[in-house]
Image (tube, grey):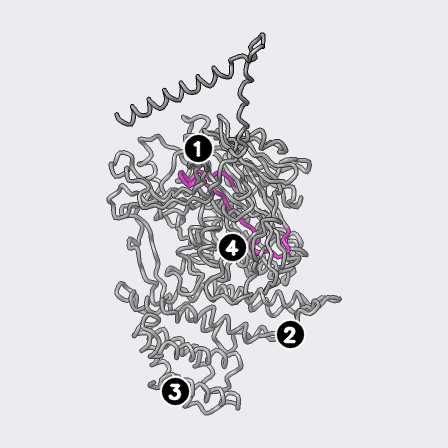
Amino acid sequence: MLKLNTLLTTLICSFCFSQAITAQEKKPKKGDEKIVEAPAPAKPAADTTKPKKPVKPSITDKIKTSKKLEGLFTMYQDTVTGSIQLYVKKSQIDKEYIYQSFSISGPTSLFLNQSMHRATAIFNIKKANDKIEFGEVNTSFYYDKNNAISKTAGVDVPEAVFLSEKLVAQDSLGYLIAADGLFLSEKLDPVKPTPAPGTPPGAIFNLGNLNAAKSKYHSIRSFPNNTDVVVDLSYDNPAPLNGGGDDITDARYVRVRMQHTFLEVPQNNFKPRIDDPRIGYFGQQVTNQTSIKPTPYRDLINKWYLTKKDPKAEISEPVEPVTYWVENTTPVEYRQIIMDAGHRWNEAFEKAGFKNAIVMKIQSDTATWDPADVRYNVIRWVASANPGYGAIGPSFANPRTGQILGADITVEWISGSSTPIIEDLFTFNGQLNNSFIDSKFHHEGHACTLAGELKSQFLTGTTFAEVNNASADDLKRIHKDFLFYLILHEMGHTLGLHHNMKSSQMLKPSELHNTEITHKIGLTGSVMDYPAVNISSDRSKQGDYYTTKPGPYDLWAIEFGYKEFDEKEEAEGLKKILSRSKEPYLAFGNDADDMRAPGKAIDPRVNVNDLSSDAISHAEDRLKLVNTVMNKLKTKYSKSGENYAELRSRFGNLNNQRMSMTSALSRYIGGVMVERNYVGDQAKANEKPFTPISMAEQKRALAVLNKYIFAPDAFKNDAGVYPYLQLQRRGFNLFSSPEDPKLNATYLSLQINGALAHILHPNTLLRLSNSSLYGNEYSVASVMGDLTKGIFNADIAGKVNVQRQFLQTAFVKQLGAIADLKTPANAYDDISKGAARQSLKKIKSMVSGAVSGDDATKSHRANLVALVDKSLAIN
């Protein structure tokens, strides 16, 4: 109160004093007749030091020099700088969208070829204060909303925000942000692969570092349901250690063209279908977090959204068919074959209740639409400078549901050849990080080698036909069957189907050339296999070279994936379809099961380049056929006025056939047949999931190897071409190594990489022992004993030729590596070590007691004894 009273007194006094001063100023001077008023006090000067509140720029201000690209996402591109601004509507905040990336052009050695399908993801858009965030959504988990635990959805699943941009401007409907940081970067899809650990510098081509200043937009397409942004990303590498292939103009400066596609999540009545291991579909791996089952899997298959126009009809046309466009880059002479092959899939869809589910069209030469537009499913033909895959047939799907949203098939044209090399996915040499490969190309974790396999098979067919003076029409038929099979196979992938490497064993050997059978049900159970080309040693009995229709398995798989059911009937209907899995023609085994790599898998029936239910006999027949053709090779391919490059190529191709047959035969040793049927499926003779290959079959396979691969005279028919295997000189392509043919390396590769690498693999040897507990009678010691006989007995009493010297030495070294006491137990088990040491002792006894042979043979045997002694020495 004291302070308040004092303040009031001061104010009153101040007021009275000011009034007195004013009165004195207004008083007129003596003699004046009027009162002069005092001038008004001057207004205080404006305070120029205080900043004005800035006026926020409007969206109109920010887009003055830009053109508008309206669609799912509205873009504004500056007409001067080319920069992009993205307008996000308020209605798009907190919604999910689908992202898909494609490579459009880039180094083929890095698999950046045209229209490679790369990353697929769900992303969302959120507003965080004055920023817009783009984040990837984790779709690996499912929560039943009726379970209280579903309230924990997202717990311990870290967010993945790949872009956070400050607002440039906003209005009542949305927000404007800069978008160059999103598109002219690697935020969406890292282009540069990560080399595998330990890869030497320069071993693979390196793009260098992204130069954002040199990067630019190529094109933008924005439609109501999708937006495509195509960018040219520039990479600089001032001091490249690897110059790349012929497609690299200058390794220091490389541009990669990428397409980023944003899609609206489809709003329809698509019903996801749960995956089943008895049938192979690509799909989405999902774990049910609200399930207490020991196998809480809710994996979904990838499939197109097909629904009947007439739901009550047994067979009806779909509301919207799956349409493929044959791009106008396709050679005219192949277009009808592709059309016919594509329509052949309609037979499978009729089993699922759909008529004309597949529609094939040809893009006209005057068409203005871009084949890269995701609204079109395109079959295209390209000519890469360095073909890295041959052909691919990928599709992409909604990760939430498995609904396929788009697909492409690309076939590579090989310059100077009337035939494309084919591969449906990729062949990897181990130089790129596997996680990069899996995440960007095939997240199921398998790679394919159809390029080398199918090319080799096709050339074998033409070689055999040509050396037997086949007509031009016969050669055209081989090519037609080959191309027909290619399109069927690739289209099967775009429909969602995995490989089925077990299907080539459907028919008996006596049925392979019976067209009454093959035209009715096919040559193989599925077109998703990598079968050997079907060749008859008797040209008059030649049947189909490849199957030209979807097989029984394909029809069954499509029925499972696409047949519509009422909700009440679905469980029972699918159960009925799946119960047929034990039928022999419906056998299935995919890349996870196949035995291409030594020691990888266990069932020899799940393999590539085999054929018929008796693959051992088929392999023997093919090896005989190769030997027959070798005798005629030089005469047929030594053409007047030409060099010997084609002869060399055909020779290499025939040895590739030997390699395929050798690999197939070796997988029977230690093999175990696998059945993935469920308890209660329709009866079949063998109810057990695992059944070892009988000892008789294992020994039969090894006997064929001993005769056609290990024997001293295994390659005697090749001798006539040896002096003519000359590589064509192109500039300085012979500079790095002598040009003489490396014959012993060729044959040793067959013997070691084709056969022994698998038979003596630690997994195979251990399986021989493990499987003895449930039926196998062929022991590790017996296998090594039979190998020793096959590799040594035939020439123990005489001269050992050069091919056998290399083989015997390599075999002894392998046994020594197994027997080495320093080798970790997890590499080779003790039973394998013991058997190897015993075999080495036998070999030493055999070669030490051999007294005949020339000087080369004697020195060879002395070396073997030294190797054995070293291996058996106690260190």
Q: Distance between the residues labelled 4 and 3?
A: 45 Å
Q: Distance between the residues labelled 2 and 3?
A: 37 Å
Gap in Å between the C-alphas at discs 2 and 4?
30 Å
Residue at numbered disc 3: 869
Q: Where is residue 249 in the image (x, y as percent from the top left)?
A: 66, 57
Q: What element carries label 2?
A: loop
Q: Which percent across, then down, holds residue 806? A: 50, 79
Give the secondary structure at mark 4.
loop
Q: Circle 3 sits in a helix, a strand or a loop, which is it?
A: helix
Distance in Å between CA atoms under marks 3 and 1: 75 Å
Mark closer to the chain start, 1 or 4? 1
Q: Mark 2 points at which residue?
A: 739
Judge whether 282 appears above or below 168 on screen. Answer: below
- Which residue does the numbered mark 4 point to in the structure image? 426
Q: Is residue 529 magenta?
A: no
State the residue at coordinates (57%, 30%). Answer: 70
* Amino acid type, label 2: Glu
For the residues labelled 2 and 4, say whether their Cβ atoms are less than 8 Å apart.
Answer: no
* Magenta-drawn segment: 383-406
Marks 2/1 in contact by CB < 8 Å: the verdict is no
Q: Nearer the viewer, mark 1 or mark 4?
A: 1
Query: How crowded is the residue under tag 3: few (<14 C-alpha within 10 Å), some, or many (20+)?
Result: some
Please indicate whether residue 869 sits to the left or right of residue 652 in the image.
left
| Earlier-in-chain disc, 2 versus 1 | 1
Q: For mark 1, what is the residue?
A: 93
Please, what is the three-letter code of the amino acid marked with disc 4? Phe
Q: Which amino acid does label 3 sit on?
A: Asp
